Image (cartoon, grey):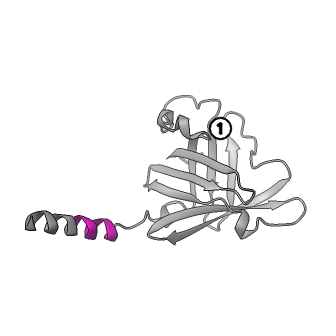
């Protein structure tokens, strides 16, 4: 029993000391991504294959070193930030030992997203080659929002 208590204590200490992913790996990067918006489809989500033609639903995310965020269709290069959105910026912060990503949108009405409207994405993995983030939250309007993305670093063109 004493060994079990020691083992349990060690495991708790190790899990408490786990560091969040290094936010610096996101800054100044381009990623080829796939995502799902329905939680029941999460098991089918795979990382994109850079050696194959991008899937029609694939998209490219760009996180500039100065904090700007861009997102394009991988198929045709079209900006897919959304209608009425002029630009975007990303925010990274550590919350409860997790790296959380949010994106602020700037509308053509000259207004940035409010802090309450931000949708948090918890970064599950962030390495030199892979990026995986999940948002499972409630919107300010009371609706459930689920989005999970898996990305691979895209070489500069």
Classify mark 1: helix, strand or loop.
loop
Magenta segment, which residues? 11-17
Q: Position of residue 61 (x, y in %)?
A: 62, 49
The quadrant of the rendering that contains the C terminus is: top right
Q: Give residue 40's quadrant in the image.
A: top right
Examine the residues drawn in magenta and state their main secondary structure: helix
Q: Give residue 140's quadrant in the image.
A: bottom right
Q: Position of residue 113 (x, y in %)?
A: 76, 64
In the rendered image, residue 45 lying in the magenta stretch gets the answer no
Is residue 79 placed above or below 10 in the rendered structure? above
Left or right: 133, with 127 as reference point: right
* Residue placed furthest toward the left: 2
The quadrant of the rendering that contains the N terminus is: bottom left
Left or right: 11, with 157 as reference point: left
Q: Which residue is mark 1?
A: 74
Q: Nearer the viewer, residue 43 or 47?
A: 43
Q: Is any atom of residue 27 visible in this view?
A: no
In the rendered image, residue 15 lying in the magenta stretch gets the answer yes
Q: Position of residue 138 (x, y in %)?
A: 65, 56
User: In percent of the image, x 52 and y 58: which residue is there?
Assistant: 122
Q: Is any atom of residue 25 visible in this view?
A: yes
Is residue 97 placed above or below 40 in the rendered structure? below
Q: Nearer the viewer, residue 54 or 84?
A: 84
């Amino acid at each position: 029993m004493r060994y079990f208590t020691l083992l349990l204590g060690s495991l708790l200490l190790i899990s408490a000391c786990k560091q969040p992913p290094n936010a610096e790996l996101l800054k100044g990067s381009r990623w080829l991504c796939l995502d799902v918006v329905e939680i029941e489809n999460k098991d089918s989500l795979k990382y994109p294959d850079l050696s194959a033609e991008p899937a029609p639903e694939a998209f490219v995310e760009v996180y500039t070193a100065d904090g700007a965020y861009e997102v394009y269709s991988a198929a045709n290069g079209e900006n897919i930030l959304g209608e009425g959105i002029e630009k975007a910026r990303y925010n990274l912060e550590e919350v409860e030992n997790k790296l959380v990503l949010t994106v602020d949108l700037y509308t053509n009405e000259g207004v940035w997203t409010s802090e309450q409207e931000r949708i948090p994405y918890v970064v599950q993995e962030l390495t030199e080659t892979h990026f995986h983030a999940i948002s499972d939250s409630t919107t300010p309007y009371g609706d459930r929002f689920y989005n999970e993305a898996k990305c691979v670093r895209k070489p500069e063109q």
